[in-house]
Image (cartoon, helix red, strand yellow):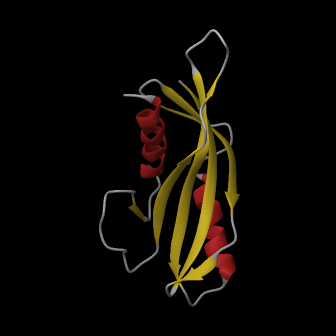
Amino acid sequence: MSAEGDIPAALMARLGELAGYTVLHPRKGGDQPAGEHIRVALVPNDSLRTGLDVQEQEHRGFLVLTLVSDLGQYEAASRNAAGAIAGHFPLNAVYESGDASVKIMGQTVRQAREEMGRWETPIWIEYQAFG
């Protein structure tokens, strides 16, 4: 595989270890579940060469997990759940797949909003990989 395939594979393997949520992956399809679930998006940034005389590149980007919850509870409940999901990707943890080693560089729970009768809380997981 390539870094473009190995990086998401490493991150999705880690996400697969998170219990208690239905996960909607990109391109996999399926209807939005009635209950609380996570929607996944991968937002790669530009890849940069690590030096003039090498073929290795640095890959950075974000794994964006959106916690989708029902309305009818205080925002603190969904922010607590989002914080626990972010904590599933601890800072400086390294996940591997194929030739990629993916390091977690940051995690941010962003401002939530109501969207189509549901409460959506974005969780941005920043990563760095070389390959």
Q: Quadrant of residue 122?
A: bottom right
Residue 48: percent from left, percent from top: 63, 28
Residue 5: percent from left, percent from top: 41, 36
Residue 76: percent from left, percent from top: 69, 77
Residue 125 against residue 6 in the figure, above or below: below
Query: In the picture provided, is 87 more to the left or to the right than 3?
Result: right
Q: What residue is shown at x 69% (from left), y 65% (from top)? A: 110
Image quadrant holding the N terminus, namely: top left
Query: In the picture provided, is 73 more to the left or to the right than 16?
Result: right
Q: What is the residue that sits farthest to the front in this orientation?
A: 52
Q: Quadrant of residue 59?
A: top right
Query: In the picture provided, is 29 more to the left or to the right than 112?
Result: left
Residue 89: percent from left, percent from top: 59, 47
- Seen from the viewer's position, the closer of residues 19 and 54 is 54
Q: What is the residue that sits farthest to the bottom in this orientation?
A: 72
- Seen from the viewer's position, the closer of residues 38 and 60 is 60
Q: What residue is shown at x 44% (from left), y 64% (from top)? A: 20
Query: In the picture provided, is 127 more to the left or to the right than 7?
Result: right
Q: Quadrant of residue 67?
A: bottom right
Residue 40 against residue 120 in the figure, above or below: above
Q: What residue is shown at x 60% (from left), y 12% (from top)? A: 54
